[in-house]
Amino acid sequence: MTDLRAVAWRTSDQSIVLLDQTRLPGRQEDFVARDVDDLIDAIVRLVVRGAPALGAVGALGVALAMTQAQREGWDADRLASEVRRVRDARPTAVNLAWGTDRVTPLMPQGIAAVLDEAAVIMAEDEAANRELSRLGADWILGRTGCDRVRVLTHCNTGFLATTAWGTALGIVRELHARGALELVYADETRPLLQGSRLTAWELQQDGIDYLLQVDGAAASTILRGLVDVAIIGADRIARNGDTANKIGSVGVALACADAGIPFVVAAPSSTVDVTTPSGDDIHIELRDGSEVTALGGVVTAPAEARGFNPAFDVTPARLISAIVSECAVVEPDGQSSVEALVRE
Ligand code: MRU
């Protein structure tokens, strides 16, 4: 397991240092956000991405805005509106707003207090990921009865998407560490290829055996009996258990339901949003159609083609076998069980 981090605060020049995920796997480069515009650009272009990583960025973004306010002499209204811009830079992953909101009350105490809380958020995220990985691995081995499981995963949920370790990929790492992992089928995750560029890169580094497949292969792989469990992350879990995650997730869930294998959602409690009643209330980010009509910068469709590019979908709770957080494993059956995912 690498010591690399997706997100860090650099004290020497009061900047946020991000491992630039648009360059991976070809190049390992940092992107340095020195002001709010830099940070919003990084969030929108997916230099940094993944719900828990966005939570850390939201908290650090408040500190970044405060340093810029000092430098440029902003008044309180300007500072508040810049913090709101960070908070709203992407709509679906609740963690971005959650991380921003958690440190905002500390702003009157100064930048150091905000940074201290951001550090707590990051430490808690790593601890949560490690704990939910243990709980998830226990549940999966118990439910499947397998000594060694074959896992399908979608998008990237590893250390790149979090502050460390990972969520769904954290469970994969835990299974691997226990000698209980046979093989991972990683979906490539069109249009931006988080699976092939990022998940494959992480699995490779850990020496985990995997096959990369196109998203369109997932249902067939599951129905052919090649998979024992699908594990995905989450961007927002609504009060009724409906879960938003990378586009393509609900298709995986439907195939699992038909094949009678478990579909598991893994996320820290910071991704649970009890203020959102159901999946119908989740704002799904609609990205530019040009991400669909091109691949890796090369246009693949007729010039007139219009791309439809929802970045996420919603898997209804009825298709989810288990949701795992650091607090509990729940088999969704309504409001009370989802609330167990969040420690009081
Ligand atoms: O658009 P992205 O790359 O930010 O989407 C990421 C996902 O959908 C992840 O599965 C989710 O954020 C969970 S990350 C632990």
Image: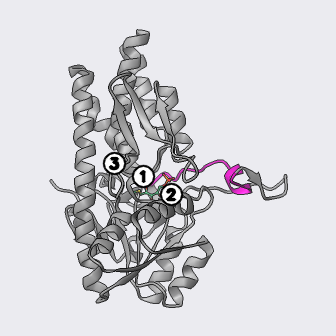
Say which mark, if any, is on residue 292: none
Residue 323 to residue 269: above or below? below
Disc number for residue 198: 2
Query: How was the colour assigned to the protein in this rendering?
Result: one colour
Q: Mark 1 sits on what residue?
A: 160
**Residue type for callout 1:** Leu
Which quadrant, please, contains the N terminus? bottom left
- Badge 3 is on which residue? 163
Reply yes or no: does residue 286 show up in magenta. Answer: yes
Element type at marker 1?
helix
Image quadrant where residue 97 sits: top left
Q: Earlier in the sequence, mark 3 or mark 2?
A: 3
As shown in the figure, which amino acid type bears the numbered disc 3?
A: Thr
Whether the residue under disc 3 has CB within 8 Å of ligand 1? no
Q: Is residue 274 left or right of residue 85?
A: left
Query: To which quarter of the image does residue 247 belong?
Result: bottom right
185, 140: nearer the viewer = 185
- Give how far apart the Cα atoms at labels 3 and 2 are: 15 Å
